[in-house]
């Protein structure tokens, strides 16, 4: 009897254990199935979302239509004439005042750069209105192509922008670049133009300017220092000659008297003989009269020296090669 009861109890325990195992298995199977269904639903939703986000390709004629091209030509034409009008007015206004001429002329290249940047920005954004993806794609492709094909042009453009904002010199300044010395008449994106003493126009690429040493005579001011050099015999009365030289500078119509006038003497050896070099330093009121002022001082000093018999005509002829 006891064995029969024991067998019954064991049988019941085994049955309960089997039921529990079956329950766990069914639960796991159901969980895995639910997970698989969830993944399938997510993938399907993402696929539908990607399909919805795919836009049909934009046709070229939708961006570059004939109407838009015509409006672009008109807009660039108007912008060009507006920029030209503003720069012309600034140039004429600057010529009316010696004190503010260089300052006003300094705005001309800035107006040109900002004006053209604004024009092309409005043409692209306001007229063509390309999608941002196309703009970025085209910009990247053009950037790479232009970077390899036009390195010198880009170097000149960046050089021009640097010159304008760094202000090493500006329109109206007198600068020395290598063998060229003259007044800066324009600073463009590609090149800088200067007019030399003999009225020659010299075009200097901005990229080369950035790699050279530049001497600025006036640094934005209308006046600059002018040096007149005269060779004299070593025995002359330097005190008297100094007085004559200073007076010669003071009476010139080109002199700027708010800055000092200086006279320096230096002994030099020329063809085995000693000579005295006079350096008369004074400031001209307008840099455009620099060479006229130099000539005026030299002529006045020599005339006075001859009139007072400080030097003779024969001595002057002997020093003509030096002067």
Image (spheres, rainbow, N blue to C red):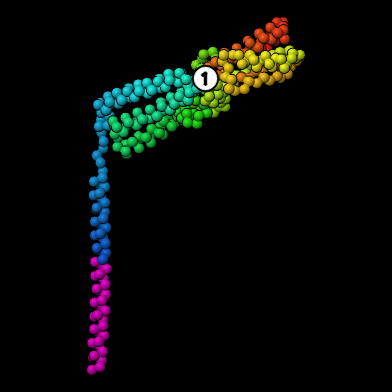
Q: Nearer the viewer, residue 109 or 77?
A: 109
Q: Residue 290, percent across and down? A: 56, 16
Q: Quadrant of residue 302?
A: top right
The local secondary structure at tag 1 comes to strand
Q: Would residue 285 be found to the left or right of residue 30 on screen?
A: right
Q: Is residue 254 above or below residue 121?
A: above
Give the residue drawn at x 25%, y 30%. Answer: 61
Q: Nearer the viewer, residue 94 or 82?
A: 94
Evaluate whether residue 98 shows in this view: yes
Specify whether residue 23 is painted magenta.
Answer: yes
Q: Residue 295, percent across and down? A: 60, 12
Give the residue drawn at x 42%, y 22%. Answer: 90
Give the residue drawn at x 60%, y 12%. Answer: 296
Q: Would residue 147 be found to the left or right of residue 258 on screen?
A: left
Please report the bounds of the magenta region as a residue range: 1-30
* Location of the N terminus (image quadrant): bottom left
Q: Which residue is mark 1?
A: 183
Q: Nearer the viewer, residue 140 or 17?
A: 140
Q: Residue 242, percent across and down? A: 69, 17
Give the residue drawn at x 35%, y 37%. Answer: 136
The residue furthest bottom is 1
Specify whether residue 293 is painted magenta.
Answer: no
């Amino acid at each position: 009897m006891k064995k029969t009861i024991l067998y019954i109890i064991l049988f019941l325990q085994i049955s309960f254990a089997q039921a529990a195992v079956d329950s766990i298995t069914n639960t796991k199977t159901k969980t895995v199935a639910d997970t698989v269904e969830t993944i399938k639903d997510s993938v399907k939703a993402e696929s539908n979302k990607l399909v919805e986000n795919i836009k049909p390709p934009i046709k070229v004629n939708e961006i570059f239509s004939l109407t838009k091209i015509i409006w672009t030509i008109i807009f660039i034409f108007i912008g060009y004439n507006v920029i030209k009008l503003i720069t012309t007015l600034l140039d004429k206004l600057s010529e009316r005042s010696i004190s503010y001429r260089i300052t006003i002329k300094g705005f001309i290249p800035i107006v040109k750069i900002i004006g053209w940047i604004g024009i092309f920005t409005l043409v692209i954004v306001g007229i063509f209105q390309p999608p941002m993806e196309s703009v970025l794609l085209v910009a990247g492709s053009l950037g790479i192509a232009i970077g390899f094909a036009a390195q010198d042009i880009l170097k000149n453009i960046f050089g021009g922008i640097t010159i304008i904002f760094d202000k090493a010199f500006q329109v109206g300044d007198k600068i020395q670049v290598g063998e060229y010395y003259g007044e800066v008449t324009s600073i463009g994106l590609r090149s800088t133009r200067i007019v030399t003493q003999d009225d020659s126009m010299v075009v200097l690429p901005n990229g080369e300017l950035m790699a050279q040493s530049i001497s600025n005579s006036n640094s934005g001011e209308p006046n600059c220092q002018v040096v007149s050099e005269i060779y004299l015999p070593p025995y002359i009365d330097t005190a008297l000659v100094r007085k004559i030289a200073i007076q010669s500078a003071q009476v010139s119509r080109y002199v700027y008297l708010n800055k000092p006038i200086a006279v320096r003497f230096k002994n030099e050896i020329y063809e085995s003989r000693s000579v005295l070099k006079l350096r008369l330093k004074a400031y001209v009121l307008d840099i455009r009269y620099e060479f006229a002022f130099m000539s005026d001082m030299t002529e006045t000093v020599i005339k006075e020296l001859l009139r007072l018999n400080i030097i003779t005509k024969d001595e002057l002829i002997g020093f003509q090669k030096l002067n």
